[in-house]
Amino acid sequence: MSVLGALALACGAPPPTGAGSPGQPNYVAMGDSAAAEPGVPDPAPPPGCQKSTHNYPSVLARRIGATSFTDVTCSGATTDDITSRAQPTSSGPVPPQIDAVGADTTLITITIGGNDVALAGDAAQCRAASLDSPPCAQRFVTNGVDSISAAINAQVPVWGTMIDDVRAKAPAARIVLVGYLTYIRPGGCFPDQPVLPTDADYFESKVNELDDRQMQLAAAKGIDFFDTRQLSVGHDMCAPPDQRYVEGFVAANPAAPLHPNAMGAAAVGNALADWLARR
């Protein structure tokens, strides 16, 4: 399972200066629950998006002293909810996230894709009662065709169009795709986390596949990709609760199951701030 290429850069020429200075940008954060970080104290409005005031975008905004900061991340978001759809939530619809972006935006982070391919939902269904349980991963391969890989492949051009749309609205912005963390180590840790070793490896390989395809896309589009996998090795859901960045099937820290916790948010936000400062 690859965790190489950590903190990788896939970039083109630096963007022109916008309304915010390079060190204090006008920052817009977009994305799904991996960026919103549901369950991490304290909740941020709107309530239906289940996002935290201590998610990685908030940590980053404080670290870099953003001139302005707009966090439109929302749990459950897909790429359509970024580009074109008013996302339905328990507290009512929220506008497409791209509406928060403008000509004066100078930094944009985006974490998206997991819901496009139903990755978290599929993984959540694969709890195993014992090592004798039938492997779950086999459900996703039919006649040699891996349905999750097929969904990722189909989504790549959709992510490409999203990047084009965001760039058109914010031509002065530095755009950073922020990848997903390492969720589980090779072989898992049954029974501490109730997933079979083969299933643990399968689902982590799908996270890696999604991250790798987005890294390649970022390079092709001339934007940045921030790879979070290496910084989270040893801090996956199998780590002791006081060392993990991602919660398991039952959360041991305040966070949603199978999602980053406050330690993960701080690790990503601080590492991303340091990475941006070097470039």
Image (cartoon, helix red, strand yellow):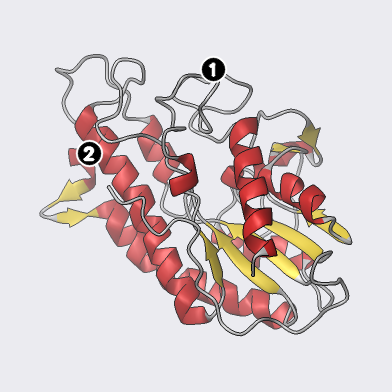
Q: Earlier in the sequence, mark 1 or mark 2?
A: 2
From the top left corner, tell me how far across and down residue 64 is, in percent.
79, 56
The residue at which mark 1 appears reads as: 252
- Per the rendering, the mark at residue 137 is 2
Q: Is residue 212 left or right of residue 273?
A: left
Three-letter residue code for mark 2: Ala
Task: Looking at the picture, tell me which residue is in the foreground, 277 or 119.
Answer: 277
Task: Looking at the picture, tell me which residue is in the foreground, 131 or 223.
Answer: 223
- Per the rendering, the mark at residue 44 is none
Question: Which residue is drawn at the image coordinates 81% and 48% (left, top)?
Answer: 62
From the top left corner, tell me how far across and down residue 162 is, in percent.
57, 72
Quarter of the figure that contains the C terminus: bottom right
Task: Compute the Cα span from label 1 to label 2.
Answer: 25 Å
| Residue 66, above or below 248 | below
Looking at the rendering, which quadrant does residue 132 occupy? Answer: top left
Residue 17 shows in this picture: yes
Three-letter residue code for mark 1: Ala
Q: Is residue 6 left or right of residue 267?
A: left
